[in-house]
Amino acid sequence: MVDKGGYNDFYNLLLQAERAGAEQFIAMRLGSAPPLTVIEEVIVPALTDIGEGWEEGTVSLAQVYMASRICEQLVESLLSGENCIAPKETPPIAIVTLADYHSLGKRIVSAFLHSHGYRMVDFGHGLTVEEVIEAVKRHGTEILLLSTLILNSALAVKDLVDKFQQAHLSVRVIVGGAPFNLNRKLWAYVGAHAMATNASDAVQVLERVIASPDRMSTMTPERGNNR
Ligand code: B12
């Protein structure tokens, strides 16, 4: 059997659509770790593995769908009680899922940042390049966090960045999501300023992007994950 660290049982409960069991598993984990850690160390890797199973043909789309529904509700309930520190002074920040409907990553990243004092406008998910540009103009966004889970959506970031330049909009773009995690050079190829591999890294990367308007030469050098 594949070693799924501490979340093997949770992974199996998701595949069997055992909502009550999954909730119980998470409740037990909360006894020893805070909600955001449980999300990053249990829920995100279990869903990622389910996605890999789907790609390999061992998991059905119905199982992916049920697993994601259960996780969405778990994430919402875990995040609802999350404490947050006082808002920080920042340039206007926004977050959006470009051109696809995988919304869970965006939800988690925005909750992590919120709990660290970063406030941002959520443009929603499934927006086109043109809709994002309109929203950026309307809100005067200076830092845009873009989540994409489908490769085509990740490639559309290049078009978006080009159009920002053509429209003389000075927007710093931070990207994240499966295509960028799979190909560690993609963020630079699409013209983003930076990327982060997960929600905890997003906090650190956002801090650095706010502090320095220049494009990052590596993504999160402290962790040495610029493969
Ligand atoms: C759950 C899921 C779904 C759910 C989505 C439910 C929802 N409300 O989000 C459902 C079943 C609806 C779905 C549908 C589809 N899916 Co889907 N899905 C997944 C799956 C299994 C998990 C995604 C997920 O929620 N993970 C948990 C979240 C929390 O993790 P995350 O999004 O990666 O986010 C973390 C980091 O990436 C990062 N991050 C994310 N965003 C951002 C943004 C910023 C700024 C930063 C800094 C960081 C950051 O931080 C997050 C927290 O750590 C992935 C597999 C995978 N490897 O990702 C496939 C996957 C993304 N899906 C895929 C596909 C193909 C589809 C469909 C096209 C399938 C179909 N034939 O219909 C549709 C498309 C729907 C659409 N148009 O958008 C493919 C994409 C492949 C590709 N090369 O493009 C994947 C990779 C599966 C696979 N291996 O083939 N899917």
Image (cartoon, rainbow, N blue to C red):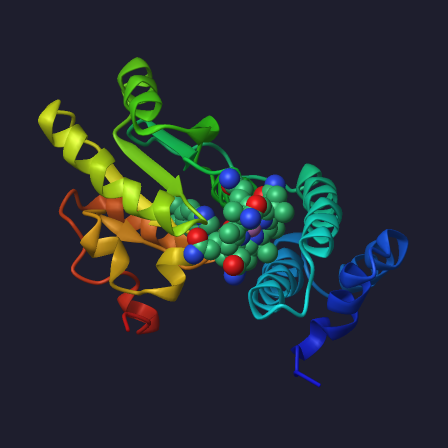
Say above or below: 125 vs 191. above
- Image quadrant where residue 9 sits: bottom right
Q: Tell me if I can see residue 108 in this picture.
A: no
Q: Quadrant of the N terminus?
A: bottom right
| Residue at 21% from the left image edge and 37% from the top image edge | 159
In the image, taking residue 117 as reference, residue 217 lies left or right, namely left
Say above or below: 46 vs 119. below
Q: Nearer the viewer, residue 28 or 42?
A: 42
Q: Nearer the viewer, residue 141 or 167?
A: 167
What is the residue that sits farthest to the top in this orientation? 138
Say above or below: 68 vs 48. above
| Residue at 75% from the left image edge and 49% from the top image edge | 66
Q: Position of residue 209 (x, y in %)?
A: 25, 46
Q: Nearer the viewer, residue 49 or 42?
A: 49
- Image quadrant where residue 221 sits: bottom left
Q: How many marks?
A: 0
Q: Position of residue 43 (x, y in %)?
A: 66, 59
What is the residue that sits farthest to the bottom in this orientation? 1
Q: Tell me if I can see residue 39 in this picture.
A: yes
Q: Position of residue 83 (x, y in %)?
A: 63, 41
In the image, taking residue 101 as reference, residue 73 lies left or right, namely right
Q: Position of residue 60 (x, y in %)?
A: 69, 59
Q: Quadrant of the C terminus?
A: bottom left
In the image, taking residue 49 as reference, residue 168 lies left or right, namely left
Say above or below: 86 vs 217. above
What is the residue that sits farthest to the front in this orientation? 57
| Residue at 46% from the left image edge and 31% from the top image edge | 126
| Residue at 32% from the left image edge and 35% from the top image edge | 144
